[in-house]
Amino acid sequence: KSYFELFDFLLWKEKLLAIGIYRTADVTTGGDDEETPRRGSKNSKGPPISPSGRRNSHDMVVRASRLSDSKHNKKTVKVSFVYTAPPGKETAMMPGDKVICFECGKDSS
């Protein structure tokens, strides 16, 4: 099921406002140290530079820090994270996901 279907059910049936997903994933440490060539560059080590000499922010590559320095020392670790405001129809709910919700207040008239 998609996050959208769960969001819709929680909001209208349960009166809960879903704001994100708490998810746990297995991550393998180590791996290749070789970088893939970036768009607009030929095996360069930095992001491509436009003809004007300025770096294009949309071409920047964000590098995640490695959990292990040795590419031969691979191991799997569990990583937990919060996915806030996920796109509803593109996000599939996974087994073990927990949805973070706010409860809708009662009318005090």
Image (cartoon, rainbow, N blue to C red):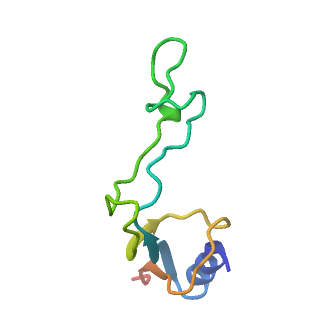
Judge whether 47 appears above or below 54 on screen.
Answer: below
Quarter of the picture holding the N terminus: bottom right
91 displayed left or right of 56: right
Whether residue 109 is visible, yes or no, is no
Report the residue at 55% width, 13% height from top. Answer: 51
Residue at the front extreme, as displayed: 72
Question: x and y percent of residue 107 in the render?
Answer: 44, 82
Residue nearest the viewer, comparing 13 with 99: 99
Q: Nearer the viewer, residue 32 or 15?
A: 32
Between 29 and 82, the one lying in front of the other is: 29
Percent position of residue 103, x then y: 43, 82
Q: Is residue 20 visible?
A: yes
Foreground residue among 35 and 54: 35
Q: Quadrant of residue 78?
A: bottom left
- State the residue at coordinates (66%, 75%): 2
Which quarter of the rendering shows the C terminus? bottom left
Percent of width and height locating residue 14: 55, 88
For the point 48% across and 46% down, the residue is 34
- The answer to whether residue 98 is above or below residue 81 is below
Above/below status of 5 relative to 73? below
Considering every residue shown, the one lying at the far top of the view is 52
Residue 71 appears in which quarter of the rendering?
Answer: bottom left
- Quick check: 45 above or below 99? above
Task: Say how many tags the image has.
Answer: 0
List x then y, in percent, for residue 105.
41, 80
**Residue at the spot x=44%, y=31% of the render?**
46
